[in-house]
Amino acid sequence: MTTKSSGFTLVELVVVVAIIGILSAVGVVSYSGYISSAKQKSAHNVMLQISLAQTEEYSNSGSYFTQVTISNSCTPDSSTSNDIETTLFGGGNQIPKEMGYEICIADTGSSNFDIVAKEIKIKEACQLTLSRNGKFGIGDDC
């Protein structure tokens, strides 16, 4: 006498769950990379807007806006980002927290400046740089 089984075996269910787990892990990693590159591109676009605002600032005042720096470098934080928004954009929300980057403007001498954006992370923060002449640099941690 033979019986006919109409369900799935435990082994079949375990295999299906394992495949779904592998696919979801790959999807999460891909999605994280997509989000990271989108935030980096957003920061680059904001840096270009700041560069254009710097041109207007130079036209109005005869000098570029830079922040107090030591040895021609700056450390981006929320206060430097807020200072840029207030001075160059009249208080607009050009550097949103959701972007994941803080920005500062370093005086590099001879009427030059570098715009520095650093990712808000505890470890391995990505740093982007845009010089006055339009040279864009990406740090090693990106």
Image: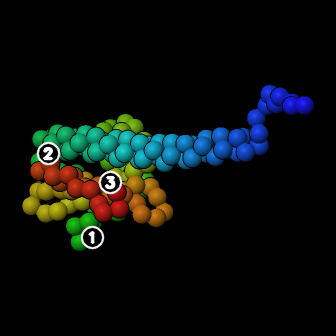
The x, y position of residue 122, in whole percent, is 48, 63
Q: Using the rendered image of the protein, determine whether residue 71 is visible from the camera's viewpoint.
A: yes
The x, y position of residue 26, in whole percent, is 50, 46
Tags 1 and 3 in contact by the CB under 8 Å rule?
no
Quarter occupied by residue 70: bottom left
State the residue lying farthest toward the right. 1
Tags 1 and 2 in contact by the CB under 8 Å rule?
no
The residue closer to the viewer here, 35 or 24, is 24
The residue closer to the viewer here, 51 or 38, is 38
State the residue lying farthest toward the left. 110
Q: Earlier in the sequence, mark 1 or mark 2?
A: 2
Work out how far the residue at label 1 is from the one at label 3, CA to CA, in angstroms. 17 Å
Q: Which mark is residue 70?
A: 1
State the residue lying farthest toward the front. 1
Please report the residue visible at 28 percent of the width from the left and 40 percent of the height from the top.
45
Please report the residue visible at 42 percent of the width from the left and 63 percent of the height from the top.
124
Drawn side of residue 100 relative to residue 44, left or right: right
Q: Earlier in the sequence, mark 2 or mark 3?
A: 2
138 relative to 92, above or below: below
Indicate the amino acid at tag 3: Ala
Which residue does the numbered mark 3 point to in the structure image? 117
Work out how far the residue at label 1 is from the one at label 2, CA to CA, in angstroms. 22 Å
The residue closer to the viewer here, 136 or 106, is 136
The x, y position of residue 41, in whole percent, is 32, 42
Q: Which mark is residue 118?
A: none
The x, y position of residue 42, in whole percent, is 34, 41
71 relative to 52, above or below: below
Q: Which mark is residue 58?
A: 2
Please report the residue visible at 77 percent of the width from the left and 39 percent of the height from the top.
9
Q: Which numbered disc, 1 or 2, marks the residue closer to the eye?
A: 1
Work out how far the residue at label 2 is from the one at label 3, CA to CA, in angstroms. 21 Å
